[in-house]
Image (spheres, grey):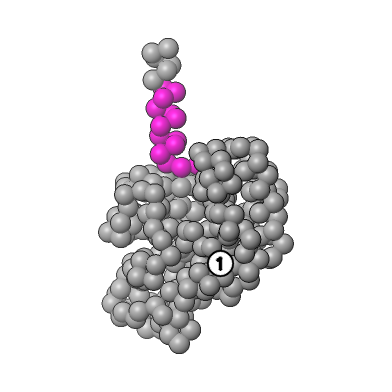
Amino acid sequence: MQLPQNQFKRALAEKRQQIGLWLSLSSSYVAEAMAGSGFDWLLFDTEHSPNDVNDVLGQLQAVSAYDVSPIVRPASNDTVLIKRYLDIGAQTLLIPFVQNADEARAAVAAMRYAPRGVRGVAAATRATRFGRIPDYARRAEEELCLLVQVETVEALEQLEAIAAVDGVHGVFVGPGDLGASLGYPGEPGHPKVKEVVEDTIKRIAATGKPAGILTGDVAFAQRCIELGCLFTAVGADVGLLVRASETLAKQFKG
């Protein structure tokens, strides 16, 4: 049995724009429904949703038959959490709140087996097709993709050093937390926040690493793509459901 290819990682290496959708409803049923919508990638969030490892396992299984790349965001830059998501078959992880190069290197180490890292070895995991990929431990790193999230003023001061870490395959801008760090909590659309986000995307692109972002603002998403953003989440399942249901209700209730 062959090691599954990471199409998302290949697309980034080839500089092909990848449009994604954020999933926070913690449901394999929703994940499967969204998997056929035409997005390049889906993000299963466990930082700001009630997702856990078992939930994400079901979501990974639900989308496995579809032509879409799953990405998992662990709740934190934690070696044990990273190991568990890799073992259930996640190949691309987005690590939140990476503040400096040392934290980025710690995330890289958690993605790699010894002697290059500290990931624990287990033979019969979903990632190894339950032991049916004989060279998994030697080749797993080829198909794993690590994205790190910069979302504070402190992280931006270390941006180039973070992007330069070997094993970091992309840098994601978090407008919500970045806006709070800049003094505009709850205002990711504030002109100052947008200005800093745009500058950050330019800086990431200048390092040669792919830049990513989540924004439900269509015009701003297009602007970020123009500036070099390569993996762009343009909406979230919760937001889509809430806005569409409100619109439908207003059509009948005034």
Q: Quadrant of the C terminus?
A: top left
Q: Residue at left 39%, top 58%?
A: 75
Q: Is residue 97 magenta?
A: no
**Residue 174, percent across and down?**
54, 51
| Residue 60 or residue 102, whichever sits in front | 102
Q: Is residue 59 above or below residue 14?
A: above
| Residue 252 or residue 189, whichever sits in front | 189
Highlighted magenta segment, given as a residue range:
234-248
Q: Quadrant of the N terminus?
A: bottom left
**Mark 1 falls on what kind of element?**
loop
Q: Is residue 2 above or below residue 231?
A: below
Q: Disc 1 residue type?
A: Asn
The residue beneath circle 1 is: 100
Q: Residue at left 68%, top 44%?
A: 195
**Residue 99 visible to an observer of this rendering:** yes
The prevailing secondary structure element of the residues shown in magenta is helix
**Residue 101, percent across and down?**
57, 70
